[in-house]
Image: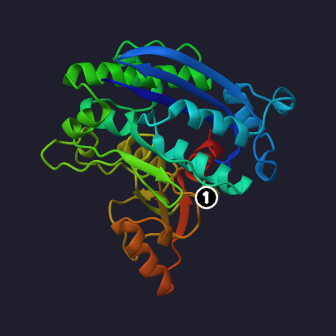
């Protein structure tokens, strides 16, 4: 039976734990049976509202002032989820947001299995971008109000239903096996991401990267100008697109961490400042080089995207 819960969160600021809205869509036997759209007060220590985030989702501090706390909303969400798997688009972001919000509230992390339609879309489709809007568009899924948590959760649910139908999968677990990408797991004892695991299924996002021409006439004062940038972990934008953005700003994107590397961008839910907290080969090598005195600055994907906005 194709039973799952699609989940999306919106945040008040660049701190992923600053959750101010949750959207849940329950799917039972392949049919949407419930849709929940909740505002909440973010954890107080990280709960300020940033203008950029407000411009995306339209939620303000005044709007959530009388709403339940995040911890209350999460308890309700967990009760609805039960033992069903959870599906999210860019699960690295949403699960990281939940973990950080729980940490800020002094709560234990909830327990659930989860899949990521961003990861799966990269296996199943061939697109320029795997963000929610273009994936929804190519699959004929309506998305009228992007960054509305319930709207995004429903789009995610319908995206997965469309991909599962193409595969003929009867369960989330069956689809994950067929697509060659394992389910992730979140629990009080830790978390494991939804990642590609099968070498037999070609990954659409791993096509050979093309080194772009570096724009040497860009703003020399931009933080990425003259930097050698390497990416690791899942990103919300296509890797080639990230490379092109770096080159446009006068940086040099490279595929491997070397002594030349000056910036390492870690995706997939990373939120700290130490590559030792993220288990990829590139992060491990960056850590070794940093310990030897090479000045490699570590950026989260959110921080990288913020640098791109400086030039817009």
Which residue lies at the image location 46% right of the left edge and 12% below the top edge? 142
Which residue lies at the image location 76% right of the left edge and 47% below the top edge? 43
In this figure, which residue is indicated by the disc labeled 1?
A: 223
Left/right of residue 166 with respect to residue 78 in the rendered view: left
Indicate the position of residue 32 as horizontal and vertical percent values. Answer: 45, 15
Using the image, determine if residue 50 lies above or below residue 279.
Answer: above
Residue 260 visible, this orientation: no
Which residue lies at the image location 77% right of the left edge and 39% below the top edge? 69
Left/right of residue 181 with respect to residue 231 in the rendered view: left
Compare residues 177 and 129 and report the one nearer the observer.
Answer: 177
Within the image, what quadrant is residue 150 found in?
top right
Residue 282 visible, this orientation: yes
Report helix, strand or loop for mark 1: loop
Indicate the position of residue 65 as horizontal and vertical percent values. Answer: 86, 32
Q: How many marks?
A: 1
Which residue lies at the image location 36% right of the left edge and 60% below the top edge? 254
The C terminus lies in quadrant = top right
Indicate the position of residue 267 as horizontal and vertical percent values. Answer: 47, 53
Left/right of residue 249 with respect to residue 41 in the rendered view: left
The N terminus lies in quadrant = top left
Using the image, determine if residue 42 lies above or below residue 199.
Answer: above
Within the image, what quadrant is residue 77 found in?
top right
Using the image, determine if residue 204 lies above or below residue 259.
Answer: above
Residue farthest along the bottom direction in this orientation: 292
Q: Which scheme is used to colour this image of the protein?
A: rainbow
Indicate the position of residue 188 as horizontal and vertical percent values. Answer: 54, 57
Using the image, determine if residue 87 lies above or below residue 25.
Answer: below
Compare residues 248 and 9 and report the one nearer the observer.
Answer: 9
Compare residues 92 and 170 and report the one nearer the observer.
Answer: 170
């Amino acid at each position: 039976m194709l039973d799952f819960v699609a989940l999306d969160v919106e945040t008040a600021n660049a701190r992923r734990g600053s959750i101010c809205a949750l959207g849940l869509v329950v799917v039972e036997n392949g049919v949407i049976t419930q849709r929940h759209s909740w505002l909440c007060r973010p954890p107080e220590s990280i709960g300020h509202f940033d203008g950029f985030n407000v411009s995306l989702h339209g939620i303000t501090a005044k709007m959530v002032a009388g709403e339940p706390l995040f911890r209350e909303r999460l308890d309700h969400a967990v009760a609805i989820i039960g033992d069903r798997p959870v599906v999210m688009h860019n699960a690295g972001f949403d699960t990281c947001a939940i973990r950080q919000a729980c940490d800020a509230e002094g709560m234990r992390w909830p327990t659930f299995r989860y899949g990521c339609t961003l990861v799966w879309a990269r296996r199943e489709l061939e697109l320029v971008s795997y963000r929610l809007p273009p994936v929804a568009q190519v699959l004929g899924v309506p998305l009228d109000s992007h960054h509305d948590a319930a709207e995004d959760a429903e789009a995610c649910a319908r995206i997965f239903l469309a991909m599962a139908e193409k595969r003929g999968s009867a369960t989330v677990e069956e689809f994950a096996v067929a697509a060659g990408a394992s389910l992730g797991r979140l629990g009080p004892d830790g978390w494991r991401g939804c990642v590609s695991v099968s070498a037999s299924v070609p990954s659409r996002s791993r096509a050979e990267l093309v080194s772009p021409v570096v724009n040497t006439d860009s703003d020399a004062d931009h933080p990425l100008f003259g930097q050698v940038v390497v990416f690791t972990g899942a990103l919300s934008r296509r890797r080639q697109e990230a490379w092109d953005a770096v080159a446009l700003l006068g940086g040099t994107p490279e595929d491997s961490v070397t002594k030349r590397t000056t910036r390492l961008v870690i995706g997939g839910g990373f939120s700290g400042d130490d590559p030792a907290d993220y288990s990829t080969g590139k992060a491990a090598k960056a850590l070794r080089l940093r310990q030897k005195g090479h000045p490699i600055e570590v950026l989260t994907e959110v921080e990288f995207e913020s640098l791109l906005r400086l030039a817009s």
